[in-house]
Amino acid sequence: MKTFTKKNNWKGFHVTRWGIIVFVVPLVLFIIYGAFKLSNWEIAPALRISLGHYVFVCNMNPPGEIKKGDHIAFRFPLDTPYFKKGDKFIKTVGCMPGDSLIVDNAKNYFCNDAWITTAKDTDVNGNPVVHFVYSGVVPEGEVFVFGTHPRSYDSKYWGFL
């Protein structure tokens, strides 16, 4: 029969404590906050191999308190050849209700005269894409969102969120 010394008891306590932190805490966070599995195409098609990570999403702002520059998580509102309705997205808010959104002939998007993004003419496979054409004030209850990658599929192709 083995007798435990203070050293052995401490190791057992140490392993148990870290086991709880490593396995239980992420599980609780997942249940409370939810997790978004980011697919490779949502972020950067050129980096397909290295992506596919989980991101925990915690709503820090009450609904309706989104600001320009905030990163927002949402479910995709449309069915398209690239994504299905309900797919999970994370994008940056580029233009808010009441802001002026202008698209020039070179497909550059400006919010209140500040450049935010540029649309491409083709997708990664060379197929032509239709881009969102709009010049005016962003309607109430709508936002223009964009991604950080030049080929991000965002409001410049499907419009306001």
Image (cartoon, rainbow, N blue to C red):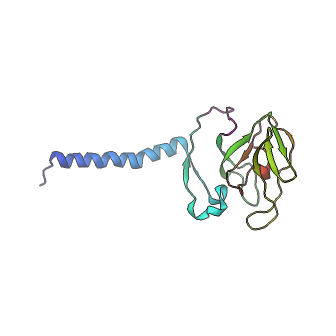
Assign the C terminus to one quadrant of the image. Answer: top right
Q: Is residue 33 above or below residue 43?
A: above
Residue placed farthest to the bottom in the image? 125
Position in image of residue 105 (x %, y %): 88, 52
Assign the N terminus to one quadrant of the image. Answer: bottom left
| Residue drawn at x 73%, y 60% as measured from the top left | 82
Q: Is residue 25 left or right of residue 18?
A: right
Q: Is residue 50 above or below residue 113?
A: below
**Magenta-drawn stretch, dominant element (helix, strand or loop):** loop
Q: Is residue 114 left or right of residue 5?
A: right
Q: Quadrant for residue 120, please give it.
A: bottom right
Position in image of residue 148 (x %, y %): 67, 51
Q: Is residue 93 left or right of residue 12?
A: right
* Front one among 10 and 34: 10
* Front one among 123 and 63: 123
| Residue drawn at x 74%, y 48% as measured from the top left | 77
Residue placed farthest to the front in the image? 114
Position in image of residue 16 (x %, y %): 31, 47
Label tally? 0
Residue 21 sits inside the magenta stretch:
no
| Residue drawn at x 86%, y 45% as measured from the top left | 134
Q: Is residue 41 above or below residue 96?
A: below
| Residue drawn at x 69%, y 32% as measured from the top left | 64
Position in image of residue 45 (x %, y %): 66, 61
Q: Is residue 38 above or below residue 20?
A: below
Please report the bounds of the magenta region as a residue range: 61-69
